[in-house]
């Protein structure tokens, strides 16, 4: 039987034995395992260490060291998170800011990351989302479509002014396209 950190058997759930054995080694192992799965913020890792009952001073030393060597970088994390979530899910800056706040990213770092999303980029994302959703709702009453589209954009973090403007633009362009299809050539 192989033993893991703290001399306990693999699969054993005795967390106290881990902490008593060598808290710093245990904390380092926990952090490295977490970072192997996916990038994490310092706050998320600190929370994980607290749940595992690692003493705060030990957790801070380990997290400081991991930050020094570049394994924890909240600024890079925030930049990448914003890029992926804005492009992949079309989230507005407001929704992205809330997500970063929940992940424990410092407000200043979050603002720097959110600066990469321009007003034009945000509006283009809202338009693309509304256009895609509008295609799926053709044939439904106009009022219902407007409510659905504006609601979807609101859930993605877009303000009501942008949402209504984009929906109006999408539905107008859809109406123009439909009218053009109905025109007969001379």
Image (tube, rainbow, N blue to C red):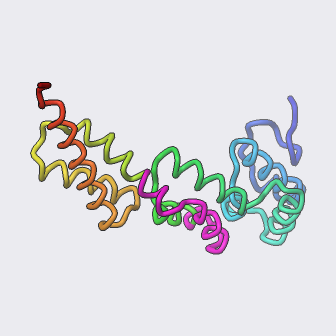
Using the rendered image of the protein, determine whether residue 133 is visible from the camera's viewpoint.
yes
Horizontal side, residue 51 vs residue 91: left or right = right
Residue closer to the observer: 160 or 175: 175
Q: Residue at x 78, y 70 (%)?
A: 56
Q: Is residue 12 above or below residue 183?
A: below
Is residue 136 found inside the magenta-colored segment of the image?
no
Q: Main secondary structure of the magenta part?
A: helix
> What is the magenta range?
101-124
Q: Residue at x 22, y 38 (%)?
A: 177
Residue 81 image offset from top left, x and y in percent: 61, 53
Q: Quadrant of residue 59?
A: bottom right
Residue closer to the observer: 170 or 98: 170
Q: Quadrant of residue 63?
A: bottom right
Q: Quadrant of residue 22?
A: bottom right
Q: Is residue 120 above or below residue 3?
A: below
Is residue 109 found inside the magenta-colored segment of the image?
yes
Q: Residue at x 72, y 57 (%)?
A: 76
């Amino acid at each position: 039987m192989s033993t893991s950190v703290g001399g306990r058997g693999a699969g054993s759930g005795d967390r106290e034995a881990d902490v008593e054995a060598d808290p710093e080694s245990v904390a380092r192992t926990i952090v490295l395992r977490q970072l192997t799965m996916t990038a994490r913020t310092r706050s998320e890792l600190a929370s994980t260490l607290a749940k595992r009952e690692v003493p705060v001073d030990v957790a801070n030393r380990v997290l400081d060291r991991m930050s020094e060597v570049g394994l924890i970088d909240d600024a890079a994390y925030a930049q990448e998170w914003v890029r992926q979530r804005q492009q992949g899910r079309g989230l507005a800056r407001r929704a992205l800011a809330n997500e970063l706040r929940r992940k424990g990213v410092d407000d200043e770092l979050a603002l720097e990351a959110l600066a990469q999303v321009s007003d034009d980029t945000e509006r283009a994302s809202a338009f693309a989302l509304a256009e895609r959703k509008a295609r799926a709702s053709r044939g439904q009453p106009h009022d219902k479509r407007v409510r659905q589209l504006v609601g979807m954009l609101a859930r993605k973090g877009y303000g009501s002014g942008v949402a209504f403007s984009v929906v109006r633009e999408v539905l107008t362009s859809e109406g123009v396209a439909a009218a053009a299809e109905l025109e007969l050539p001379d």
